[in-house]
Each structure stands twice: as structure tokens, then as C-alpha cells.
Amino acid sequence: MSIELPDSAVSESAEPSSAPTRRTFIATTTVVGGVALAGGLVAVPPGLGADEAEAAEAPPGSRVSLTVNGVRRTITVDNRTSLLDLLREHLDLTGSKKGCNAGACGACTVLVDGRRVNSCLTLAVRLEGAEVTTIEGLEKGERLHPLQQAFIDQDAFQCGFCTPGQIVSGTACIQEGHTGSSEEIREWMSGNLCRCGCYVKIVRAVEQTARGK
Ligand code: FES
Ligand code: FES
């Protein structure tokens, strides 16, 4: 019994040798594309000059005005910029640390309108009109914030990487009134990890500051 194949089922090998097959087409365009990229060649849409093409390729940006540590700032940023990157890379406020950059460690904790947030997960362009407080904004003139002093008194850090986030978070913990016991402090500070294991002394520092409030 003979079976007739539909045209679409004819294999590539059945095409005339001079016609480009799907395989040769893909191979050719891949090589050409790779060469173009390697040489820095980018296709400019018809009708656009080089400057316009560059502008068309630039990621979308927005202007945002916010108050950081009492100073009004207006800045244009890529819409994907996190608050953490805005602080560290645009405003030179490097006290807030980038640990995991994924909301898991708390090293980047800052206050936004008095509430603690992971700045690595917060889009800067959503903060129009917000009040942001970082570790740099806690001291008053030459005087440390009482919790900063308590961290020194209690020797509540080793490498110090987590410390800015711990202190900012601790100030909110005290303001929120979650300091009734060491267990309660632990619970409400549980978003801030310390790889050096200074938890006992961190809790003591928060307790010391809460008592003196
Ligand atoms: Fe933001 Fe770790 S850096 S939570
Ligand atoms: Fe080193 Fe906390 S003091 S991570």
C-alpha cells in the first residue's frame, strides 16, 4: 500500500540543494547576528538618527521627588531602580547595605514614612513625596541616636555589615512598642539577620534603648 505525504510533511532533504533549508537559514542568521553584536553593530530603525536610536534604546526613566534624611531630593532614575540603589549609587548614602538584594536579610532596612522597609525590594519611582530615613539620618548633629550608642555599649556587632539595618529596624521596633520582652524583640527583629551571631547583644541594645525612652 502506498502512502502519499502532504507537502508540509516533505523533509528538508527533499528540497532542491540550492534552496535554503530551515537549518541553514537559522545557522546563517545566528552567525550574522553574532558578528553584528561582536562588532557593536546595532540596527537603527529606519528614519532614526544615531542619537534618536540611542534614546529609543535607553531604559525608561522617571523623575521622583522625595525627602531623604530631611533633605528634599529630585532625581531622574531608571524605572527599575530600587530605593537601595538610589540611596547608594545616586545619593552616596552607603550606610544601607546590600546583602542578599532579595528581601531576605534586612541589611538594607530603611524607614519610609516611619515604617521599616527592605529598600532592595522597593522601587524608587513609587516613592514620590515619601520621607525616607537611613542610618545616616538617625544621629542628631554630633550626637549618636540612643540605639547607636546602645550598640556600642553592648558591643552588639562584630563585622558590622548588618548593623545599619539592625539599628534602623530597632528604632522602628521601639517606636512600635514591640519591646515588652526579649522574646518579643526577637520576634519583631527577626527580619534582620546577623551572620556573626550577635543576636543576644542586639536584643540587649534594643532593651537598653527602650528602657531609656
Ligand atoms: Fe535587602 Fe537583603 S539586601 S533584604
Ligand atoms: Fe557581622 Fe551582624 S555583625 S553580620
Image (spheres, rainbow, N blue to C red):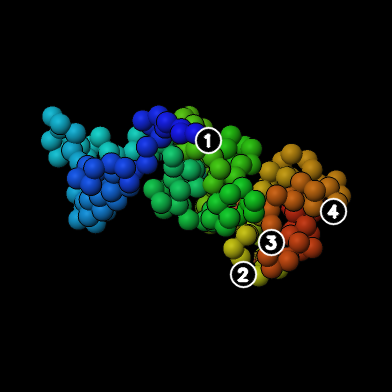
Q: Is residue 2 above or below residue 172?
A: above
Measured in 3D between alpha carbons, the distance from the residue under mark 1 to the one under mark 4, in whole angstroms, is: 30 Å
Measured in 3D between alpha carbons, the distance from the residue under mark 2 to the one under mark 3, in whole angstroms, is: 9 Å
Measured in 3D between alpha carbons, the distance from the residue under mark 4 to the one under mark 2, in whole angstroms, is: 23 Å
Q: Position of residue 92 (x, y in %)?
A: 41, 53
Label 1 SS? strand
Q: Give whichever of 48, 182 is nearer the camera.
A: 48
Residue count near mark 3 (Cα–Cα under 10 Å), binned few <14, some 14–19, many ≥20 = many
Label 3 SS? loop
Q: CB atoms at circles 3 and 1 under 8 Å apart?
A: no
Residue sitting at 86 percent across and 51 percent down?
A: 183
Mark 2 residue CB less than 8 A from any atom of ligand 2? yes
Residue position for label 4: 182
The label number, if any, that marks residue 194 in the structure image? 3
Q: Nearer the viewer, mark 2 or mark 1?
A: 2
Closer to the N terminus: mark 3 or mark 4? 4
**Residue 204 visible in this rendered orientation of the protein:** yes
Q: Quadrant of residue 162?
A: bottom right
Residue position for label 1: 131
Q: Is residue 162 above or below residue 69?
A: below
The label number, if any, that marks residue 25 in the structure image? none
Mark 3 residue CB less than 8 A from any atom of ligand 2? yes
What's the residue type where badge 2 is placed? Answer: Cys
